[in-house]
Amino acid sequence: MLKILKYSYYDLIRSRWSYVYFLFYLALGFVLLFLNNDLSKAVITLMNVIIVLVPLIGTIFGVMYFYNSKEFTELLLAQPLKRSSIFLGQYFGVAGSLTLSLILGLGIPFTLYGLFKSNAIWDFSLLLATGAFLTLIFTALAFNIAISNENRIKGFGYAVLLWLFLAVVYDGLFLMSLIVFEEYPLDSYSLLATMLNPIDLSRTLILLKLDISALLGYTGAVFKQFFGTDAGLMVSVAMLSMWTVLPLWRLAYKSKHKDF
Amino acid sequence: MILIENLHKKFGKNEVLSGVDLEIKGGGIFAILGPNGSGKTTLIKSILGMVIPNKGAILVDGKSIRKNWKYRQHIDYLPQIANFPGNLRVKELIRMIQDLRQKPSEADQLIGFFDLKPFLDKKLGTLSGGTKQKVNIVLTFMFDSPLIILDEPTNGLDPASLLRLKELILVEKNKGKTFLITSHIMQFVEEMADEIVYLLEGKIYFRGTKEALMARTGQSDFEHAIAAIATTPADA
């Protein structure tokens, strides 16, 4: 698996898109720091960008890479390699290079600005960790969609719909359900609903850490009340890990039963 | 060497293989023939584990290939359509496959044999169809494996390269290797094959030597014999 990872990674590093993604974050980091002039404030602004954009990039990149590397995959399938290691290797190649672009792209401007001397370092690290998680999760979901759909257009469509649903529609539905059922106790329902969406979960996780009650919202407040800050962090990290592992498990399973 | 028992494969509603039984003992060139869509490529891909059969068993060297991947270490495969990752260089691709296989290889010798030296630093996406096929052949033949599977090996080759390919196949055959070859070029099959396996509607319709085939169809010409076999009753 490590060898496949290496070659997928090299292949991606050489493609223009990794650089575009890296330069975008680099520019974003510098601009935010320039405009906010304050590390903690920049972290909050950045959060809003990351929790929407990272899933989108992960999804699209994942689907694109999977379909584009069809020939490469077929070449590998005839070699003495385990199927799951071919696909997991490719997956970690994509997710790894995306995560690296994110961490370097944002890390460089923040470090130059004096991150290590400020007390925003933990908030910032958490932000990057969440970004990495979201990349892993959405690339895995994208690979799942791509392996189940031979038709590229369909696969691409489903992937974008999935992102749209989790990033936008889900919140709307959730909010509406809260209004409709406002007469009932909704604590455990909203806890569950938050955990079932990795984007909401990430947002709550970061806000819990930043300890900004004003931005926490109803769900965040319930979360905090229910778990407290520390346990809340642990639970959300555990859930994010679940969100990563389950799609990967399905990917490995699907890859064993597919014809090429 | 290869034992196939009651192999069935469906793609959706389309039944491609419906009960193939085949035993291939080591040594010699076996041509797998049949009309378009008769299941030749599916059969080959099943042996390679790329297609997963619905029913039946495949044994390579006495071991079932189900949930097994190490046996592919002893198989070289030339795929039908040589599509490679486009932004890799020829040299890098060869090195990558060598790295993945971890076996001694004769790449340099073959590169010289097929005049591929000037293309080593070119990207695979920019190569012509014939050159890609030559790269494909180098990748297939550079390892020393007892079983070699070739799916339409003559595709896109110029006459000189075709002669070299035939020479190469004969050299390897004389070392006692087994070849499975599919081709639509009957001249090539007639010249190379020791035995014919004819697939029709997902079953093995005929198996035997060229002489047996001609005797059965009553044709004196190999190409006509192949064309006639599908209409000849099985017990004739």
Image: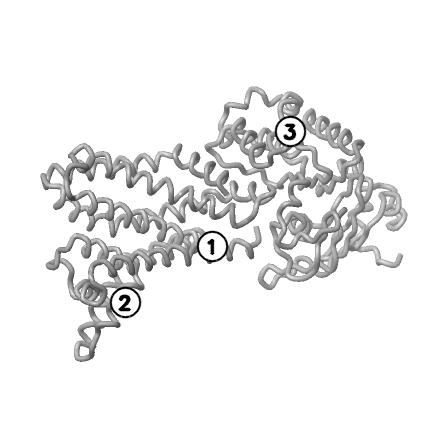
Q: Residue at x 79, y 55 (%)?
A: B205
Q: Amino acid at mark 3?
A: Ser
Q: Residue B159, relative to residue A90: is it above or below?
A: above
| Chain under numbered label 1 | A
In the picture shown, does residue A224 fall above or below A11? below
* Identity of the residue drawn at 15% across and 60% down: A216
Q: Is residue A218 left or right of residue B171?
A: left
Q: Which residue is mark 1?
A: A251
Residue that mark 2 sits on: A193
The colour scheme used to paint the residues is one colour
Q: Which corner quadrant of the image does residue A183 belong to? A: bottom left
Circle number at residue B105: 3
Q: Is residue B36 left or right of residue A46?
A: right
Q: Residue at x 21, y 36 (%)?
A: A27
> How far apart in space, not on screen, are marks 1 and 2 (Cα)?
25 Å
Residue furthest out toward the bottom: A183
* Residue under the point 17% across and 64% down: A221
Q: Crowding near pointer 2: few (<14 within 10 Å), some, many (20+)?
A: some
Label 1, label 3: how far apart the Cα atoms are: 33 Å
Q: Quadrant of the C terminus of chain B?
A: bottom right
Identify which residue, B200 or A182, lies in the foreground. A182
